[in-house]
Image (tube, rainbow, N blue to C red):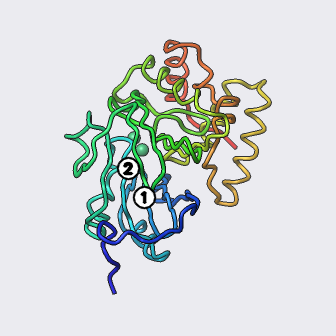
Amino acid sequence: MRALNPATTPAAAPAGTPLQVWLIPVLQDNYVFVLQRGRRAALVDPAVAEPVRRALEERGLQLEAILHTHHHSDHIGGAPGLLRRWPGAAVIAAAADRERIPLQTRSVAGGDHLEVLGEPVEVIDVPGHTRAHIAYWLPRSGHLFCGDTLFAGGCGRLFEGTPEQMHTSLQRLAALPEATLVWCAHEYTEANLCWAAAERPGNREIRDRLAKVIDLRRRSLPTIPSTIASERATNLFLRTQNGAELGLLRRSKDGWRGCST
Ligand code: ZN
Ligand code: FE
């Protein structure tokens, strides 16, 4: 039997049911994030539809909303297929990217406050990787979905923005509470920290974090989520004083050929 449309029959979840967040690895190194409360689900950046649809159906979940951080195909590609299965789901994305992110039912901008699965969500403008990139912060439960802006140990490439814009965007995220869980959209952590360790050979915190990350990856485990505290301590891009400094680091990382280990 096909599940009923969540728009007309919200799946009952007792009051106080906690919000859970988990991830689905897809493509080469993308993560799709699932927000779940009882049988209700929302997704951040579904790159593809099929494995995500299967994961939700296996757990009997009803999709209520899709949130996009930016327009790249590895962040929006799954939306049409998922909407065929759950046509009532909302699609939330940047108003400034209406032409490049189709199917939007709620167009948002930095500073907007929303509710997803009964959870307060704040939109933060984080241009740099693309000109209209946004992040979603859940202040009550302490989750951050930052797409390709802040990575564990790194930051996104500057496709459409300046180093100054990325610096400002990263500082906005760095100002969030230390315990905030950082769900970034790619598993780039090992390469980022390898580069950072080579860039700052004397930095013990970076070296220790890299060792932990290598161990996780050897066991095929995700290194996500990170925390704002960990990024403040070991992410060189977050620790820059200005755009010029960030630009130099970004060029160094862009030219980095990887670790020999
Ligand atoms: Zn991207
Ligand atoms: Fe991406």
Give how far across and how far down residue 19 sits, in percent: 55, 58
Q: Are marks 1 and 2 in contact (CB under 8 Å)?
A: yes
Give how far across and how far down residue 118 sits, in percent: 46, 54
Q: In the depicted view, which residue is nearer to us: 178 or 140?
A: 140
Left or right of residue 72, residue 198 in this image? right
Q: Which of the 4 image quadrants contains residue 18?
A: bottom right
Residue position for label 2: 67
Give how far across and how far down residue 228 sits, in percent: 63, 35
**Residue under the image location 46 percent in, 24 percent down:** 166
Q: In the depicted view, which residue is nearer to us: 87 or 33?
A: 87
Looking at marks 1 and 2 on the same chain, the residue that comes earlier in the sequence is marked by 1
**Residue under the image location 58 percent in, 27 percent down:** 175
Rendered-image quadrant of the C terminus: top right
Residue position for label 1: 42
As shown in the figure, which amino acid type bears the numbered disc 2?
Answer: Leu
Left or right of residue 231, residue 43 in this image? left
Give how far across and how far down residue 89 sits, in percent: 31, 61
Q: In the depicted view, which residue is nearer to us: 164 or 38?
A: 38
At mark 1, the secondary structure is strand
**Residue under the image location 45 percent in, 66 percent down:** 40
Left or right of residue 246, residue 164 in this image? left
Tell me which image quadrant ligand 2 sits in.
top left
Q: CA distance from mark 1 to mark 2?
A: 8 Å
**Residue under the image location 59 percent in, 25 percent down:** 238
Q: In the depicted view, which residue is nearer to us: 162 or 111?
A: 111
As shown in the figure, which amino acid type bears the numbered disc 1?
Answer: Ala
- Is the residue marked by circle 2 packed among few (<14), some (14-19), or many (20+) residues within 10 Å? many
Rendered-image quadrant of the N terminus: bottom left
Q: Which of the 4 image quadrants contains residue 99?
A: top left
Q: Which of the 4 image quadrants contains residue 42?
A: bottom left
